[in-house]
Amino acid sequence: MPSTSQRALTWFGVDDEWERPRPPVGRQDVVLAASVEAVSLLALELVRSAGGLDHTDVPVWTQWLAVSTGAALLLGRRRWPLVVASLAALHMFVAGVTMPQVMGQVSLQIVYFVALLSGVAYARDRRAMVVVIGTIVLFMFAWITWQFAVGSAAQDMIDEARDGERIGLFGAIPAAVAITLLVNVIYFGGAIVGGGVSWRAARQRIRLQEQAATISAQAGRLREQAVVDERLRIARELHDVVAHGVSAMGIQAGAARRVLDRDPDAARTALSHVEEASRDALTQMRRLLGTLREGPADSWDDGTDGADTASGMRTSEAGVDALPDLVAQANREGLAVRLDVVEDQPCATSRLPRGIGLAVYRTVQEALTNVRRHSTADTVSVVVRVHEAAAYAEVEVVDNGRPRHGTSGSGLGQLGIRERAATHDGQVDIGPRVTGGYRVRVRYPLVAS
């Protein structure tokens, strides 16, 4: 078990590797020193005018010099803390011996206190700080002890002259010196402890800033990686969509070639399908955003690992028609999910481009995952609107819950929704509702860009 002295040294950071920054003498140091000097000189003259310096024989200019040099020490209290603390102790001793009434002024006592506190608070070498401050304290208390010894001897002489009569329990001079001793214990102890608290607070503040910077940098890297992963995932899925279109083009072109001579109408129909498939494939290719197909394996937040657990199909082939299975799975896991599909024309959802259909599916999948993990909701409404006349498809997921305490997410799920919507020039609205609950709404244009 560490001793009291070891704990004290640890508290003062003797073995700590951190060094407090040493700022240069700045504007605030100049303002502080000038303000202290002005107040000190004014207080000195007020005390003189009130007759408080009648027993001081030193010239007035010497008194002014003592006050001014004391205030000037504060200029370097942060830049050279131990030097200033040593000079302040020397200043206190010299002034106390030659002009004790001037040294006892409140303004100079504040200067000494601040200098000692700054020596503990700003010293970079903590071992040197312990040596210097310890030496100052020992010297000052040796001085007080010497005064106490002299005072006791003088009191003995006074007691003999008064035949041992005393006014109180203690003699006047020893009592005065004892009070001085107690005041100085509080004075020096307060400066040293205050300096230690200041040093520890500065160290903690710097460490918190470093931790915040590290966390911010890590969060930025995670966000960038999430964007890259999501774009790679989208690229793979769009690649599958385009590959399907190219395969369909090959099949239709082969059919047209075989029936071209005996059934021109069937050949024209097949060729029109080829044209439609090629147009759709080109549209999807323009949306690849230059990302690469190769990347980490698909891994979604709900753990499907690239496959719809309800239907067994690849999620890159999922669309609006796969939403009932996704909703049924959520219902089995304890959520009451209602799915509504609104179409302005019959079978409009079946005519959605494969990329947009997949984006709608992914949006619902991610929104339901977030509800299960981070919300108190027990009811969710999923609405898919396809309006071919207005050329848009929209998906809206609304729940009735509040954020669950202790389950704050990383935000990467919503980032994926936004990235996917941006791939299709979609508009995203995600956030809490005024009437309660949470809403995720994404609208995709159906006009080719």
Image (cartoon, helix red, strand yellow):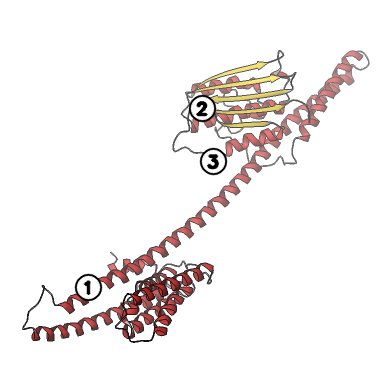
Numbered label attached to residue 179: 1
Q: Is residue 2 above or below residue 55?
A: above
Mark 3: give few (<14), some (14-19) or many (20+) Cα within 10 Å. Answer: few
Q: Are marks 3 and 1 in contact (CB under 8 Å)?
A: no
Q: Give the distance between the C-alpha atoms of the residues marked 1 and 2, in whole angstroms.
A: 68 Å
Residue that carries the numbered disc 3 in the rendered image = 410
Q: Residue furthest right?
A: 261
The amino acid at mark 1 is Ile
Q: Is residue 128 left or right of residue 329?
A: left
Give the residue at x 45% y 76%: 73
Does residue 3 appear in the picture of this structure? no
Quick one: quadrant of the N terminus? bottom left
Q: Is residue 132 above or below residue 326?
A: below
Percent coordinates x, y for residue 365 in the rendering: 58, 28
Give the residue at x 30% y 82%: 54
Nearer the observer, 270 or 352: 352
State which tag comes first along the sequence, 3 or 1.
1
Percent coordinates x, y for residue 229 in the rendering: 64, 41
Q: Give the distance between the C-alpha atoms of the residues marked 3 and 1, in whole angstroms.
A: 62 Å
Q: Is residue 170 left or right of residue 120?
A: left
Q: Give the distance between the C-alpha atoms of the residues marked 3 and 2, in whole angstroms.
A: 20 Å
Quick one: quadrant of the C terminus? top right
Which is closer to the viewer, label 3 or label 1?
Answer: 1
